[in-house]
Image (cartoon, rainbow, N blue to C red):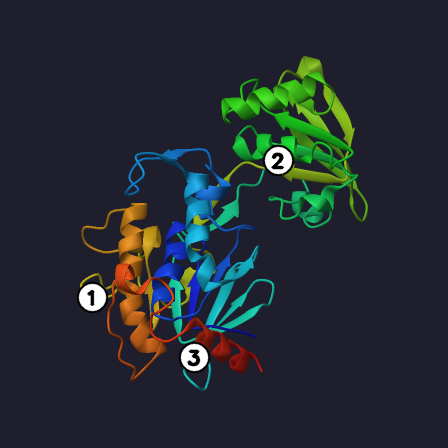
Amino acid sequence: MIQTDLLIIGAGPTGLFTVFEAGLLGLRCHLIDALPQPGGQCAEIYPKKPIYDIPAYPEILAGDLVERLLEQIRPFSPGFTLGERAETLDRDAEDQFIVTTDKGTAHRAPVVVIAGGLGSFEPRKPQIPDLQLFEDKGVAYMIKDPEAYRGKKVVIAGGGDSALDWAIHLVGIAAEVHLVHRRNEFRGAQDSVDKAAALAAEGRIRLLTEAQVSRLYGDEHLEAVVVAHNDPKRGEVYVEADSFIPLFGLSPKLGPIGNWGLEIEKNAIRVNNAYDYQTNIPGVYAIGDVNTYPGKLKLILSGFHEAAVMCQSAYQVARPGKRFVMKYTTVGGINGFDGSRKEAKKEVVQALK
């Protein structure tokens, strides 16, 4: 069981910044995210998209913002459970929250912070017969470890940044890389389009455009896919494959969080914005795009503000009876807040024994 002070559900920009604000208060954080890496949709969907409303940055790419946030929180050594979705919320005999993921990983904390952006991201699945039969048997909707595809024959479907970037990345790792797209034009960054085209010209990526994967074959594991061209006159192509990875984007949903007894309004979680962004369940907070209240602005900047305010309230829950004196980082730096980090690390070791 993973023990922490603040259990943060969602490792997007707001969740990551929460680690910083909580760290200044001497609170330990652990983050859960269904995606295989931190950053939320900034990292998964549009890492090369410029953002213009982050203070001190006239323009910053979404992926670079995530890197800066990870650098900022590194001194506080947060824990991560990635590639797993928060599934259930319970309380134990000591009034601590127990959050268990879809993979069975259990987490325990006095405070739960839902910072899931627009919710958990679920893959958009193509309409292919028997697709679900091959899930985890050759079919995957995201790439967690590129090395898992070493020496394999891989078919990627999609026309955005994820499909292009992974196809490029797997060249030299996979034995074969096919990239299937239903159109001739790709939606990804031009640099990625140009790289994929150059690799295709060298025969290192096999492009099949104006086509879609229509059938899957195999017994215990995927063995081949059939690619059908949009124009029936061009027929079908049989492609041997160990792995099929459709990358058609992610659909945001509250998912299991919607069954936790929280007050929901139009697929968002209602919170008390007059005080601390707490939900109707004491000790459970919601910040960022996942929450709603009168005058709500769905901006990363707003999520940062909500994280800072929320942490002041969460401190009282995580450290009942303790008094915290607010100091500015210009005075105390990041290591001198509410006792030393050594003491916090000692508490972690004791909790895990």
User: SS class of the residue under badge 3?
Assistant: loop
Q: CA distance from mark 1 to mark 3?
A: 22 Å
Task: Please identify the quarter of the rendering in which residue 27 is found.
Answer: bottom left
Element at badge 2? helix
**Vertical side of 13 occupied by 177: above or below:** above
The residue lying at 27 percent from left, 68 percent from top is 312
* The one of 331 and 153 positioned closer to us in this rendering: 331
* First of labels 3, 2 by sequence position: 3
Residue 96: numbered disc: 3
First of labels 1, 3 by sequence position: 3
Q: In the image, residue 4 lies at what x, y percent?
A: 47, 72
Residue at image point 57% right, 62% down: 102
* Residue 59 shows in the view: yes
The x, y position of residue 310, in whole percent, is: 29, 64
Where 297 falls versus 115 (above or below)?
above
**How many callouts does the rendering have?**
3
Q: In the rendering, which numbered label is found on residue 166?
A: 2
Which element carries disc 1, helix, strand or loop?
A: loop
Residue under label 1: 275
* Quarter containing the N terminus: bottom right
Please name the amino acid that badge 1 sits on. Answer: Tyr
Is tag 1's residue or tag 2's residue first in the polypeptide sequence?
2
Spatial CA distance of label 1 from label 2 is 44 Å
- Is 178 above or below relative to 56? above
Residue farthest toward the top in the current orientation of the protein:
233
Using the rendered view, name the quadrant where residue 141 is placed. top right
Nearer mark to the viewer, of 3 and 2: 2
